[in-house]
Image: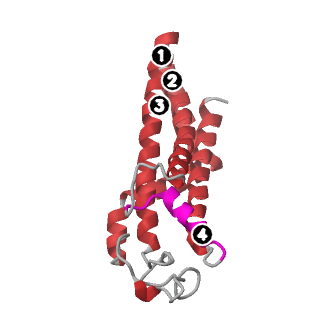
Amino acid sequence: MDQVEHAAPARRGLWQSKTFLAGAVIAGFLVLVAGLGPLLTAMTGQDYLSFHLDSIDTDGMPRGDFGGISGEHWLGVEPATGRDLFAQVVDSLRFSLAVALGAAAVEVLIGVLVVAAVTRRNVRRLLGPALVYGALLVPVDLIIEVRTAFLGFGLRRPPAPSWGGMLFSATSWYGTDPAFLLVPGLLLVVTVLAFLLLGAGLYRRFVA
């Protein structure tokens, strides 16, 4: 009974935390975008495979401002190929988040079981710390997945897009087409920051 009475104000206080709220809103939005990825891409009429040579100049640079952003290509196009950048980013986000969330869930489950077995504590009492641990593991696992793909050892192979692969390709074009690097780069920063804020909010409520 005491645990139930304590949990109710804890949940109310959690949603009053600006740190947690900011992280939850941003992370929730990103997960929603990732989940609706195929539908959103279909709405644009694009995919990550098709070349759009009419969207690039003879030197391979996207036509138009900021990497060729237009009503047809919401985030512009990839230099040299003209492939839709929005379709690539959304599909990469979907895959990388799935890997990071899945890996974090497995790690948390193993951690909870080990701690519960060693300390003989009730698993329910470990829920708060487990949520903190999981929220902080997601950005770590995400960076590992992106870095691995950046180095060419990712779980996906071309032509399927990967976050790390996009960043690697973008380094060759940064001087002439900074948007190609900024779009996936800033999205990675926002994603990592969102889960760090989420974890910080959970930590203040359940651990600190």
Front disc: 2 or 4: 4
Q: Based on the displayed image, in which of its 4 quarters is residue 189 positioned? A: bottom right
Looking at the rendered structure, the kind of residue marked 1 is Ala
Question: Is 201 on the left or on the right of 70, as rendered?
Answer: right
Q: Residues within 10 Å of mark 1 (few under 14, many from 20)?
A: some
Q: Residue at x 49, y 28 (%)?
A: 127
As measured in the structure, the alpha-carbon distance from the residue carrying label 3 to the one carrying label 4 is 36 Å
Contact between marks 2 and 4 (CB within 8 A): the answer is no
| Residue 200 position (above or below residue 181) | above
Q: Earlier in the sequence, mark 3 or mark 2?
A: 3
Where does label 1 land, which residue?
116
Q: How is the image coloured?
A: secondary structure
* Alpha carbons under labels 4 and 1: distance apart: 49 Å
The reply to whether discs 1 and 3 touch (Cβ–Cβ < 8 Å) is no
Q: Which residue is mark 3?
A: 107
Crowding around mark 4 (Cα neighbors within 10 Å: few <14, some 14 to 19, many 20+) is: few
* Residue 161 drawn at (x, y percent): 42, 62
Q: Specify the label residue 172 is tagged with.
A: 4
N-term mark: 3 or 4: 3
- Magenta residues span 160-175
Q: Earlier in the sequence, mark 4 or mark 1?
A: 1
